[in-house]
């Protein structure tokens, strides 16, 4: 069997289909790269990462195959011999690419690509919904005669991954925050092309302890731009904590983990809608979106984000909109795609399919570690023994109470400007001979080295800190996690030490120990503040 690919995105789609053949020793799978794609370099790299054996194109053309699979109708696919199966490239057929095929006809339904010498070259069009079959019959009737509705194997992986939602969020360090995922397709009408500053704008105005922002970029855009240049362009947002999803599997895990999705006209958000996630439109218009398509209907039913400052209001509106309706017109046969595909593909092979059950696999746990901001501007409000803090990137234009920074990693300029400096203890033990600061010694050293600093905080663990305040002296801090409905929420202890710093600055610490309530984003935690404990003083950093 031969798998023919033109791009990394198409390969990823086909990898979701290949479990149909798992365990069958009668079948040998080979891959080939169809020539002529602008994205073939990343396609070749993705093929190499998959571990598949690659057949050169010229050799693939000369050979006879028992079955040929592809997920793109473009290219010289008709030159390959053997029964040919064409699978969808994404969720529905929502876009028509200008100067590419027939005007205003999605390429996946375009006779320009589906016919060779006037005849359909694919022996099977595997579609995800009857709506797609109806549109195929309208645009290319002869190809529709070879079509079957089998569902979407990628959606089935989403459904299998729902139970892993908390695990994905733990891997991303989301905690109790709202995870807002931006989804950008590729091309001149995409979110990143039309609104390239939106990721930085959102990470700049959303409170760090209330929101986490992630970005999904279409594999074609990854290929066209390259990860180096993409990371360079997104550097301000990445420094502020933006999560940039990898283009295989991780993007899907982020949709499962998301609390809401902000999208252009790419079909990625249809998967989130199928899971019932709130959707906000950031589509600025263009000529690619097909009116009446599932994606067009989804965007018509969702609130629109005209400016980054309106996100919280748009999110509030989006929660009252049921996104499953538009998504239902893109996905049929939910949970049965692999079984139905197995029947179709083994029929084409002329083999009896295995009798073993087929279950879609969940997506891998995200491996991207979000960058933690090294400096944050803090807005603090002290009301008796209750302190509310909101933290923003250091360059924010918002009115703030103080700047906090990691010493010395944040750099000289921010270290010199910070009223609160902190350092986390090493999580792994020292190896061999070493010299280490004690928490007591380090906090004294920092206040001596940074005369503008008022508080130095050693973060010993997520629940335990030692603070040295210029007026209040050495203090130990214990953080109690929030417990609600059988779940435990931990906050970033660097947010808590900012709250305590603000409280100490208000001059109300005459009587210790004291119990404080700290509001950080959606979470309120109880903090016990006392004179320094002996074991905290001697803790090695």
Image (cartoon, rainbow, N blue to C red):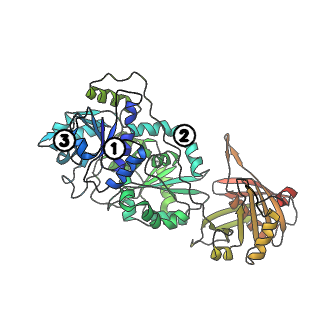
Q: Do residues under tags 3 and 2 come within 8 Å of each other at their CB atoms? A: no
Q: Nearer the viewer, residue 201 or 114?
A: 114
Residue 323 showing in the rendered view = no
- Specify the quadrant that holds the C terminus: bottom right
Quick check: 66 left or right of 445? Answer: left
Residue 227 at x, y percent in the picture: 43, 60
Crowd around label 1: few <14 · some 14–19 · many ≥20 (10 Å): some
Mark 1 vs mark 2, CA separation in Å: 33 Å
* Farthest-out residue, bottom: 451
The answer to whether the residues at label 1 and label 3 have Cβ atoms under 8 Å apart is: no
Residue bearing the label numbered 3:
138
Dot 3 lies on which element?
Answer: helix
229 left or right, relative to 420 = left
Depth order, front residue of 459/109: 459
Location of the N terminus by quadrant is top left
Residue 53: x and y in percent read 36, 41
Q: Position of residue 68 (x, y in %)?
A: 27, 37
According to the image, label 1 marks what residue? 54
């Amino acid at each position: 069997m031969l798998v023919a690919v033109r791009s990394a995105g198409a390969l990823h789609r086909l990898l979701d289909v290949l479990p149909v053949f798992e365990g069958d020793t009668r079948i040998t799978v080979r891959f080939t790269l169809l020539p002529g794609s602008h994205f073939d370099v990343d396609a070749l790299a993705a093929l190499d990462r998959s571990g598949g054996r690659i057949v050169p194109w010229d050799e693939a053309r000369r050979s006879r195959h028992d079955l040929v699979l592809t997920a793109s109708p473009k290219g010289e696919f008709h030159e390959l011999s053997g029964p040919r199966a064409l699978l969808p490239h994404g969720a529905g057929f929502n876009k028509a690419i200008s100067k590419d095929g027939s005007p205003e006809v999605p390429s996946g339904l375009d006779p320009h690509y589906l016919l060779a010498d006037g005849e359909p070259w694919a022996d099977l069009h595997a579609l995800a919904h009857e709506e797609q079959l109806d549109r195929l019959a309208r645009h290319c009737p002869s190809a529709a005669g070879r079509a079957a509705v089998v569902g979407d194997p990628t959606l089935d992986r989403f459904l299998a991954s729902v139970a892993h939602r908390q695990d994905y969020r733990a891997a991303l360090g989301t905690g109790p925050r709202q995870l807002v995922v931006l989804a950008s397709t590729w091309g001149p009408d995409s979110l990143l092309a039309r609104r390239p500053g939106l990721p930085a704008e959102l990470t700049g105005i959303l409170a760090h302890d209330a929101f986490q922002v992630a970005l999904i970029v279409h594999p074609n855009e990854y290929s066209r731009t390259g990860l180096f240049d993409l990371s360079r362009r997104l550097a301000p947002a990445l420094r502020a904590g933006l999560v940039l999803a990898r283009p295989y599997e991780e993007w899907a895990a982020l949709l499962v983990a998301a609390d809401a999705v902000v999208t252009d006209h790419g079909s990625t958000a249809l998967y989130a809608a199928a899971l019932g996630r709130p959707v906000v439109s950031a589509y600025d218009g263009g000529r690619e979106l097909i009116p009446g398509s599932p994606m067009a209907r989804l965007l018509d039913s969702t609130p629109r984000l005209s400016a980054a400052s309106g996100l919280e209001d748009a999110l509030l509106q989006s929660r009252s909109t049921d996104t499953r309706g538009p998504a239902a017109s893109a996905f049929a046969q939910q949970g049965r795609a692999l079984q139905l595909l197995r029947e179709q593909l083994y029929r084409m092979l002329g083999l009896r399919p295995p009798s073993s059950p087929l279950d879609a696999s969940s997506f891998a746990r995200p491996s991207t570690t979000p960058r933690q901001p090294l400096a944050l501007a803090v807005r603090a409000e002290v009301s008796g023994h209750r302190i509310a803090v909101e933290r923003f990137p250091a360059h924010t234009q918002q009115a703030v109470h103080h700047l906090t920074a990691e010493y010395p990693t944040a750099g000289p300029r921010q270290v010199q400007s910070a009223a609160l400096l902190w350092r986390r203890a090493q999580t792994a033990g020292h190896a061999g001979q070493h010299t280490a600061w004690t928490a007591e010694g380090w906090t004294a050293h920092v206040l001596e080295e940074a005369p503008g600093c008022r508080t130095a905080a050693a973060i010993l663990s997520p629940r335990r800190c030692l603070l040295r305040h210029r007026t209040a002296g050495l203090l130990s801090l214990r953080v109690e996690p929030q417990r609600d409905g059988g779940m435990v929420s931990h906050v970033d202890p660097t947010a808590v030490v900012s709250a305590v710093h603000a409280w100490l600055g208000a001059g109300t610490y005459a009587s210790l120990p004291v119990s404080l309530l700290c509001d950080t984003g959606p979470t309120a935690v109880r903090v016990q503040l006392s004179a320094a404990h002996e074991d905290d003083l001697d803790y090695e950093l």
